[in-house]
Image (cartoon, rainbow, N blue to C red):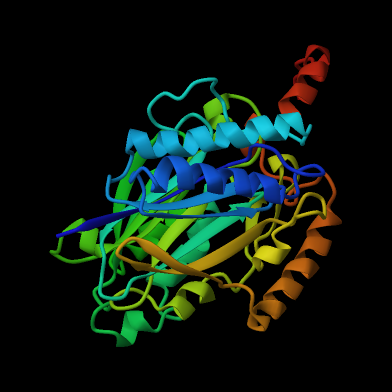
Amino acid sequence: MSLMTVSCIKADVGSLSGHITVLPEMIEIMEKHLEKEGKKKGLIIDYHVFHCGDDLETVMTHRKGKDNSKIHKLAWDGFVKVAKYAKKRKLYAAGQDLLSDAFSGNVKGQGPGVAEMTFVERKSDPVLIFACDKTEPAAFNLPLFRVFADPFNTAGLVIDPKMIQGFSFEVLDVYKHLMVKLDCPEEMYELLALLGTTSTYAIKRIYKKGAEPLEERIAAEVCTEKLNVQAGRYVGKDDPVAIVRAQSGFPSVGEVLEGFTLGHLVSGWMRGSHKGPLMPVSLKYATPTRFDGPPRVVGLGFQVCDGELIGPKDLFDDVSFDEVRKRCNRVADYMRRHGPFEPHRVSEKELEYTTLPEVLKKIEPRCKKVNE
């Protein structure tokens, strides 16, 4: 049984004109690095580099498994090179997601976001990569629930004998670092009780129920690192990535994409302090400018062939998503009119690691206790 690993590692290491986009030269630097230090040395099989907003995204295939220090160092060293260029060009927030001066053996906890999936490559293996900008890991809660647990979204849950047994969800408490596994459809209500609290719980992993090895049943992996919690201060939003396998016992590509047709409200947007609609866009429009948003998600479709990444297809580059984008713009108008008021501004708990606490400290000495 030959195992394949897809690693998606991303970081914000500098951007053009605020938090909008990366320069083509930055993508080129990372591509040359992965080619020379990774592919030519046999460390990785293939790679693809792209961006979503101000985040530089890398996709790598290899046979070294998850959390491999050599793979993580390869990505880290590439981000360092790009950050040096960004600093030289005086780009905004250069090196923002590199929270340490030295690599510690794994990029987790050091700033970059990571989603990795190890699986047995099928005869035909469509693998989808989703990347968000200006939002948090729980942005994937609603769409992935719809994809893997809602038959009104995914017809295969009802009519496909390979899927009717359902899927298991691993959910993470991002603050307490506690994980729980819940099965659907049996524990759907318990699952929703957690996933609806997006400030605390995020889907980490989804796999098909069955007796086969996990590497044959793994369906989705999500980056759940919270950058502000790692740093203990506001250093930008988490901007998560996710890997999803499709077809042949998993939801079809169309069913996966259908999960993103609501434009649901997520936390993030300006200074990580506001809620707004998650807009599915093509790579061309992954450049959030209005109030640093609204939040975006892009999708890339690959076929994995002996580790080679065939593609990608820009999945949201389709007129069938135009109405979703129109709805997102209308929702953005409505939410923006709330200004600094909730529900546009996130809850007090979510503001804990933003810039607001620094403002509140100034007035704290003037607060007096009263009896009413």
Which residue lies at the image location 38% right of the left edge and 40% below the top edge? 71
Location of residue 15 with respect to 355 vertically, above or below: below
Q: Is residue 54 visible to us here?
A: no
Place residue 236 in its image quadrant.
top right
Place residue 358 in its image quadrant.
top right
Q: Where does the image place residue 292, in percent across and percent down from the top left?
A: 78, 49
Location of residue 359 with respect to 116 vertically, above or below: above
Q: What is the quadrant of the N terminus in the image?
A: bottom left
With 368 as the anchor, is 283 left or right in this view? Answer: left
With 84 as the anchor, is 2 left or right in this view? Answer: left
Determine the residue located farthest toward the bottom in the rendered image.
159
Q: Where does the image place residue 126, in percent across and percent down from the top left?
A: 38, 71
Place residue 283 in its image quadrant.
bottom right
Determine the residue located farthest toward the top in the rendered image.
365
Location of residue 367 with respect to 91 vertically, above or below: above
Q: What is the quadrant of the C terminus in the image?
A: top right
Which residue lies at the image location 34% right of the left edge and 59% below the top edge? 206
Q: Where does the image place residue 145, in percent across and percent down from the top left?
A: 44, 65
Which residue lies at the image location 29% right of the left edge and 52% below the top edge? 181
Q: Where does the image place residue 204, in percent across and percent down from the top left?
A: 39, 50
Q: Is residue 43 visible to us here?
A: yes
Number of on-image labels: 0
Location of residue 259 with respect to 74 vertically, above or below: below
With 189 as the anchor, is 323 left or right in this view? Answer: right
